[in-house]
């Protein structure tokens, strides 16, 4: 096996020496070609560029600043349209928490909004090009293809999600199952017997965990239960809510997997001539100012997302610095009852 092939097999980043070995030239010739300076022939330059491409090598833009294992840049890729991200309080709070840690360390956040199938390549380019010291991985799927692919290249990373989703990576997560159980038991204690939930995308790991917990606790309590799938947006949240309310045995209480969809549901209830909470109780996930500014104010599962983002970032610094980091849960969401939940109308 050639040295360059061994490098790829071990999964470490290719170096300028690996490119030189594959192209059959000296490292100085590689540097000349890649910086587009005179000194090598066109054919040699083409051979060097082809070798660099085959090895996935890119100029290490951060090499000069990374001596001494100092941390300077953290990567975060989010599969969301830019317009939707700007309306989503969770990620605004989460990123603020990340920045609160990075700012104290004179570090930067490299943020990219992407399509879901682009993320592996984005993280690979960042890491192999020396643009980041590590990354935060969010919105994990069950059997997420990012996990084996990014572990193979040696990317230091922390997963925001349950350890069952994280593979070999350290993870920081919230106990979604316990929070779902608390929310359902609260609604049942108010007297609701028909309870529904509007979830985020079904493939997301935390959606699966919440759905399983919702199904188990409603069965245990003998409740009629349904789950409708949406994508966290107001439009799809509204559509899912309408479908639930059109059923002949419509629910008297609905739990939403984020605050935006719950706020949108207030308008849907009005379309049906239903009063919140007398005819329909609504409960949101990820308490935010939106929940407190609506009328009626929205009951919610409160979670300190700012502190969560900071905690994830501290964990990533530990991983980057080679410290042994044990995956751990963050503070669990807690129920904040407000005016949108009440006993059902008799």
Image (tube, helix red, strand yellow):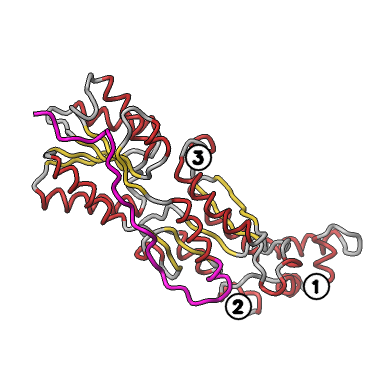
Would you say residue 314 is visible in this rendering? yes
Q: Residue at x 27, y 41 (%)?
A: 337
Left or right position of 150 against 331: right
Left or right position of 265 against 343: right
The mark found on residue 6 in the picture is 2
Number of the front mark, 2 or 3: 3
Secondary structure of the residue carrying tag 3 is: helix
| Mark before the other along the chain sequence, 3 or 1 | 1
In this rendering, the answer to whether 13 lies above or below 88 is below
Q: Residue at x 22, y 53 (%)?
A: 213
Left or right position of 218 against 71: left
Q: Quadrant of residue 62?
A: bottom right
Would you name the residue on which mark 1 appears?
Answer: 27
| Mark before the other along the chain sequence, 1 or 2 | 2
Q: Is 308 part of what is drawn in magenta?
A: no
| Mark before the other along the chain sequence, 2 or 3 | 2
């Amino acid at each position: 096996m050639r040295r360059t092939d061994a490098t790829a097999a071990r999964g470490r980043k290719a170096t300028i020496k690996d490119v030189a070995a594959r192209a059959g030239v000296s490292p100085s010739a590689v540097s000349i070609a890649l910086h587009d300076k005179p000194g090598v022939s066109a054919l040699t330059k083409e051979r060097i560029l082809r070798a660099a491409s085959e090895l996935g090598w890119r100029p290490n833009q951060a090499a000069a600043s990374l001596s001494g294992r100092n941390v300077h840049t953290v990567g975060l890729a989010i599969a969301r349209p830019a317009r939707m991200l700007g309306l989503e309080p969770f990620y605004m709070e989460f990123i603020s928490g990340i920045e609160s840690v990075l700012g104290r360390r004179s570090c930067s956040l490299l943020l990219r909004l992407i399509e879901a199938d682009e993320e592996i390549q984005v993280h690979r380019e960042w890491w192999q090009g020396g643009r980041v010291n590590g990354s935060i991985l969010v919105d994990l799927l069950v059997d997420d293809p990012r996990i084996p692919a990014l572990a193979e290249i040696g990317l230091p990373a922390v997963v925001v999600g349950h350890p069952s989703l994280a593979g070999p990576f350290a993870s920081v997560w919230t106990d979604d199952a316990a929070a779902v159980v608390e929310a359902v038991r609260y609604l049942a204690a108010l007297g609701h017997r028909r309870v529904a939930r509007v979830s985020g995308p079904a493939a997301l790991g935390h959606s699966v965990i919440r759905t399983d917990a919702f199904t188990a606790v409603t069965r245990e309590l003998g409740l009629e239960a349904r789950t409708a799938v949406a994508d966290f947006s107001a439009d799809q949240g509204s559509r899912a809510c309408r479908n639930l309310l059109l059923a002949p045995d419509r629910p008297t209480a609905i739990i939403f997997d984020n605050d935006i969809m719950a706020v949108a549901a207030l308008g849907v209830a009005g379309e049906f001539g239903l009063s919140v909470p007398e005819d329909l109780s609504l409960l949101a996930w990820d308490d935010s100012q939106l929940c407190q500014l609506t009328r009626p104010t929205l009951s919610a599962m409160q979670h300190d997302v700012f502190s969560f983002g900071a905690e994830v970032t501290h964990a990533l610094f530990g991983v980057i610095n080679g410290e042994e980091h044990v995956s751990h849960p963050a503070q669990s969401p807690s129920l904040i009852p407000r005016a949108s939940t009440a006993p059902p109308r008799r």
